[in-house]
Image (tube, helix red, strand yellow):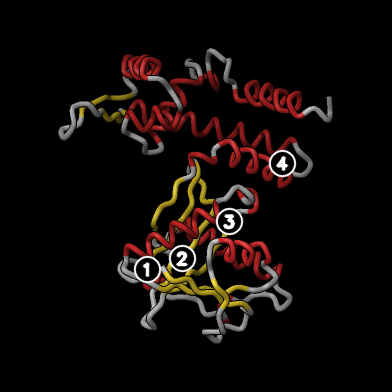
Amino acid sequence: MLSDPIARTRRFHRAVTTEAGVLDASFLGRGRPLGPARVLNAIGRGITDIGEIRAYLRLDSGLMSRLLRGLEDEGLVTVESSEVDARRRSVALTEAGEAEFAAYEALSDKQAADIVARHPHPEVLLQAMDIVATALGYERTTIEIVSPLDPRAIVCLEAYYAELARRLKSGFDVNLSADPEARDMEHPRGAFLLAMQDGMPIGCIGLKGTDKGYAELKRLWIAPTARGMGLAQRMMREAEARARDLGITCLRLDTNSVLSDAVAMYHKLGWSEIERFNEDPYPDLFFEKLL
């Protein structure tokens, strides 16, 4: 059984559904099952279009209607039709709904903290959770254009810098690198792309505009628990698409040969090695791609 992937997966499903209270008639003791609680959570997190909530939670229209009707009867939500398109409806929390959402958040945070505290090596447990969550939710990964100064972008960039410091023999000091100005990675000069999954940033890449006849791709980073599923290639292609939208016809990037997986990917995606084009002390390989 220990070597049977089917048995191990089903054991995992049973453990998660039991711990999460999927079968409880009163999820977290608030008097309603998990279904309406998840809808309430989605609304509280800012998903107000009913169609988007259905897609996010993978609910059919009949069940979605019943769950919303129940929350309306409790006085927790209000539903309105769009003024632009009567076929689309949006939902919002009432004051009582806001209070219920806050109560669920506090209880869910405590439940999560208790689960993590059980394990003698919490970071190992959290990493396993991240791997599973990323794999299960990969199809729902979205790529957003944000400011490179967005707090979520900064989290990714700091993780990227820390990884370079570990992997490069010379270490890494961002102050010594050719670190792009934030404005160079914002419209209309460039863009900064963030990969998001269920509210968690799991990757980033910057498109840096220059006045040298080319733009650069910078700061490609994918969370370790999200690697190997094609997200880096997707981010590269999306950055190239943004470059085309801005009328950019030539892209360049630099990297270090220690990052062998990245180097192999650049070759696979049609990038060509060129001579050094900057004075950054950290890269030893340089690439170009004509769009």
Query: Mark 4: few, some, or many residues within 10 Å (few <14, many ≥20)?
Result: some
**Which residue is under mark 4?**
125
Query: Furthest residue to the left?
Result: 83
Assess whether mark 2 and mark 3 are in contact (beta carbons under 8 angstroms).
Answer: no
62 or 261, which is in the foreground?
Answer: 261
Which residue bears the numbered disc 2? 206
Tag 3 residue: 222
Quarter holding the C terminus is bottom left
Which is nearer the N-term, disc 2 or disc 1? 1
**Is 291 on the left-hand or right-hand side of 82?**
right
Dot 3 crowding, Cα within 10 Å, few <14, some 14–19, many 20+: many
- How far apart are the alpha carbons under marks 2 and 1? 8 Å
Using the numbered discs, state the Cα–Cα distance from disc 1 to disc 4 in whole angstroms: 38 Å
Residue 254 badge: none
Question: Marks 3 and 1: CB-CB under 8 Å?
Answer: no
Q: Secondary structure at mark 4?
A: helix
